[in-house]
Image (cartoon, rainbow, N blue to C red):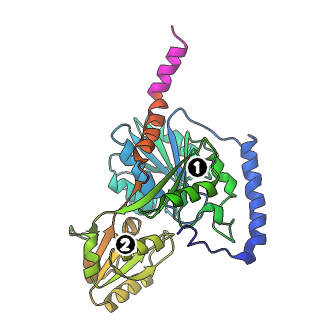
Amino acid sequence: MEGDLIKIREWLLPIAWLYGIGVRIRNWLFDTNILKSKSYDIPVISVGNITVGGTGKTPHTEYLIRLLEKRVKVAVLSRGYKRKSKGFVLATADTPMQNIGDEPFQMKEKFPNIYVAVDKDRRHGIEKLCDGQTAPGTGVVLLDDAFQHRYVKPGLNILLVDYHRLICDDKLLPAGRLREPQAGKDRANIVIVTKCPPDIKPMGFRVIKKNLKLFPYQALYFSTLKYGNLKALFGTDTLPLGSLKHQGKLLLLTGIASPEQMKMDLEHHGADIVPLTFSDHHDFTPGDVKLINETYASLAGSLIVTTEKDAARLKTLQGLSEKVKKALFVLPVEIEILRNQQKTFNETITNYVHKNSRNSILAKRQDDHPS
């Protein structure tokens, strides 16, 4: 049920109150235009959250890529968390993961025909992508994890909220996981409650909608995770999810913010999970490699399942035993919009991109100023 992963550290509430003062002042400076937000004459869609931890930003961004890549040239701009490079980097087929970060690397591998770039300064990144030379033909920019980056004003702001950790039940850092007060959600054009059970009841939808207290201008959607067949990281083998119940102990190897949902979903498919959990975006050390090898050896020949994001880091990791490599499978994940709202959601996105494309804007200006 929603709220089942909420843990509030009550003794840290005074510090959270002080933190909230700082965040509210910053937001006030933007709201009163003392600090400037810049908009662009190209469709810019932000996908983000107001919580620390995984809400499913990458699979939702990938959903938008699949929706748009046949209609327009897509560019994804990310900060490139924990990358070893600095400044603006436009990924190519040969760009190493260390130079752009695991999530951008994952997206570039899965969608080789789009632009993937990283830049801590999102304004500079958008301007590089739209200068006509760096990334020719860019028709839409998807901002990954930029809800708090208020120096850019996206044309469409999508806020993701974890079904298991609703923002209305959470508290500010460090007592809870909120990056900013709940009122920050008011900047969103679209709110998506993520990681919902696929069989969530109508009453559940109504309770969540009431508790979120959205404005009439904000559209609310619900999504669930949808898994594909397991794919060998070092090889071409595939395994159906239904086979997991016959595999014995399964080592779930993750370095993501919220592995609980994945664990529950695999258990639902009959898997007997042994978790080996590292921190989000974890840089695996030789000690970690030894731990992985030894843990797998102790399970006497089971499978190892990891995430697509972790696979980006594990693929080039030195020291994994041959047995581990042979047993290591990646679990692809996509999202599905629930409540028969997928068509409406898709049309909202595609209509926004079409109406705000450079060609449409130019045509409108010509209509407004006929020769």
Question: In the image, what residue occupies the spot 40% across and 36% down?
Answer: 136
Q: Residue at 30%, 75% (x, y): give it.
A: 328
Give the image location of residue 69, x and y in percent: 36, 43
In the rendered view, tell whether residue 348 sits above or below residue 337.
Answer: above
Report the side of 110 relative to 42 (left or right): left
Under mark 1, the amino acid is Asp
Magenta span:
359-371
**In this view of the protein, which residue sits in the foreground, 334 or 139?**
334
**Which circle marks residue 18 in the picture?**
none
In terms of secondary structure, where does tag 1 sit? loop
Q: Main secondary structure of the magenta part?
A: helix
Task: Residue at 36%, 37% (x, y): give it.
Answer: 71
Residue hosting label 1? 121
- For the residue pair 276 and 38, the one nearer the viewer reads as 276
- Left or right, residue 37 beside residue 311: right
Q: Quadrant of residue 241?
A: bottom left
Disc 2 designates what residue? 306
- Badge 2: how crowded within 10 Å, few (<14), some, or many (20+)? many
* Residue 317 appears in the figure: no
Location of residue 306 by image quarter? bottom left
Check the image and report above or below for 246 versus 188.
below
Q: Earlier in the sequence, mark 1 or mark 2?
A: 1
Residue 79 drawn at (x, y percent): 53, 55
Please identify the residue farthest to the top as the structure is shown: 371
Q: For the residues carrying marks 1 and 2, which lies nearer the camera in this image? A: 2
Residue 333: say if magenta: no
Q: Is residue 147 left or right of residue 118?
A: right
Amino acid of disc 2: Thr
